[in-house]
Amino acid sequence: MPETTFSTSVSDPKATFGESGVGAPRSNASSQVGQLYADLFTKPASPDKSRSNEKSAGPIAPSVPAPRTPTTLAECGLQLGHIADLVLKQLYLHGTLLGGDIARATRLPFSIVDEALRALRDQKCIEVASGDLVGRVSYRFALTELGRARARELFEHCRYVGPAPVPLEQYVEQCQLQHVTGASCTMAGLQATFRNSVIRQSLLEELGPAVCSGTSIFVHGPAGNGKTLVSKGLGRFLNENGGEIYVPYAIQAESSIITLFDPGIHRTTDDLPTPRPEGAAEVPSYVVPEGHFDTRWRRIRRPVVVTGGELTLEMLELQYNESGNFYNAPMHIKANGGVFLVDDFGRQLVRPKDLLNRWIVPLEERVDYLTLTTGRKFMVPFEQLIIFSTNLDPRELVDDAFLRRIRHKVKIESPDREMFTEIFELICLQQQLEFKPEVVELLFRKYYDQGRTPRSSDPRDLLQIVDSICRFYERPVTLDERLIDEAARRFFGHL
């Protein structure tokens, strides 16, 4: 799945512009006004002969070992009673199920599920409603009255029904194998990601080692110059080129279940079914396919989670489902193995100092501590590239103790005159307007040379106003000094 935002999505419409950077294309000045800076200033779609010989940096082959399919109850990491409870709840919801269907629902090999079925049969909680000669995998199981009563009790205790959870220890072990530091990042890869953007080589030289560190980046600078665009570009780079990792549907910690896989965040790569050879017989429904890895996990692209001003301390803790009596993992844990972007840092509902205090230990130790409703704490990995993006003065937000834990600080400056002209010319090209150097000369003479600082986003904003004026007067959209001066007067007007 592509980069997503919600409180957690990278298509957030607030993207700004890079030091010399520009974003994705826009078809006209009026069709995508709401996207603001997220998708602007891209190179034209027509072939660029000067770049035709560049090598394309495609996705990097996954190098993370997959979680191994368990063959025994011990390798599964769960107690037999926990699996039996899931089986009872599955049967309670569906009435009757084939043995193979139960195995698929719990994402466990039938040999392990069969141990739970035998135990439940001995306890007189289930019975065989029907069966084929193929074996127990083809038997149809149903609950007895005792089994239904026990299933109702289980639902009172915990309403989670789904794939069997992964023990916390196995999740920790897998996270250590797929940390962001293990992802490959080269100059060629970054250039390919930002190939449709105007961005200085010196900025890429700062960003590359920051990504390789896999730790934390503090992106700061004046508003409207590309901090969000650059930050999301790094997320896109890791999502598309960082290889594949694995995330479990749920984990079990301290006998509690915590759901982790989120289809709104995690872009899966294991959805395509295995093609059936032409002429081959249809596989019976009770056959459980052998997976290449533990199917309690999903294979995904490295996730990208974006949050902005809505971030609170409560969102960084376990989300307890009172009616279901299980938990949902916080956003930054769902970002493990990928990128967690805190956009507009300093403008959150929570005070910056409180937010930073919450992350002092995770940034230093690469682990976080989550608390259950019982008060019990447990440790989880904090293996992600975390990016703080702000247009506020960093010294007013954070102290030296926190800055020491942010390994890389990247400042994105306002464009100089040459870069501003290049951006303006590019926007004109995208909107099929004739670029006239005299309009840039006017802007600098009347505004920028008089004390106003140019921003990378100004060309787009000014041309949008020009477009609006021309459409209001029902005239073709053109660019001249009078129109750009009128647009600048409206845009730069004193409040």
Image: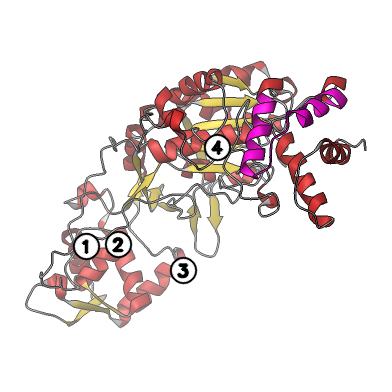
Amino acid type assigned to the residue bearing label 2 in the image: Thr
- Distance between mark 2 and mark 4 Cα atoms: 48 Å
Location of residue 394 in the rendering, given as x and y in whole percent from the top left corner: 70, 23
The disc label shown at residue 156, or none: 3
Which residue is at 24% across, 76% downward?
126
Q: Are marks 1 and 4 in contact (CB under 8 Å)?
A: no
The image quarter in which residue 314 lies: top right
Q: Are marks 1 and 2 in contact (CB under 8 Å)?
A: yes
Neighbours of disc 4 within 10 Å: few (<14), some (14-19), many (20+): many
Neighbours of disc 3 within 10 Å: few (<14), some (14-19), many (20+): few
Q: Are marks 4 and 3 in contact (CB under 8 Å)?
A: no
Q: Is label 1 or label 4 in front?
A: 4
The disc label shown at residue 106, or none: 2
Location of residue 284 in the rendering, given as x and y in whole percent from the top left corner: 16, 73
- Label 2's element? helix
Q: Earlier in the sequence, mark 4 or mark 3?
A: 4
Location of residue 14 in the rendering, given as x and y in whole percent from the top left corner: 67, 43
- Distance between mark 1 and mark 4 Cα atoms: 55 Å
- Label 1's element? helix
- Distance between mark 4 and mark 3 Cα atoms: 58 Å
- Label 4's element? loop
- Distance between mark 1 and mark 2 Cα atoms: 8 Å
In the image, which residues are magenta? 419-447
Rendered view: 461 above or below 85:
above
Amino acid type assigned to the residue bearing label 3 in the image: Glu
Q: Is residue 72 visible?
A: yes
The disc label shown at residue 187, or none: none
Q: Is label 2 or label 4 in front?
A: 4
Main secondary structure type of the part rendered in magenta:
helix
Residue highlighted by disc 1: 113
Which residue is at 21% across, 59% downward?
274
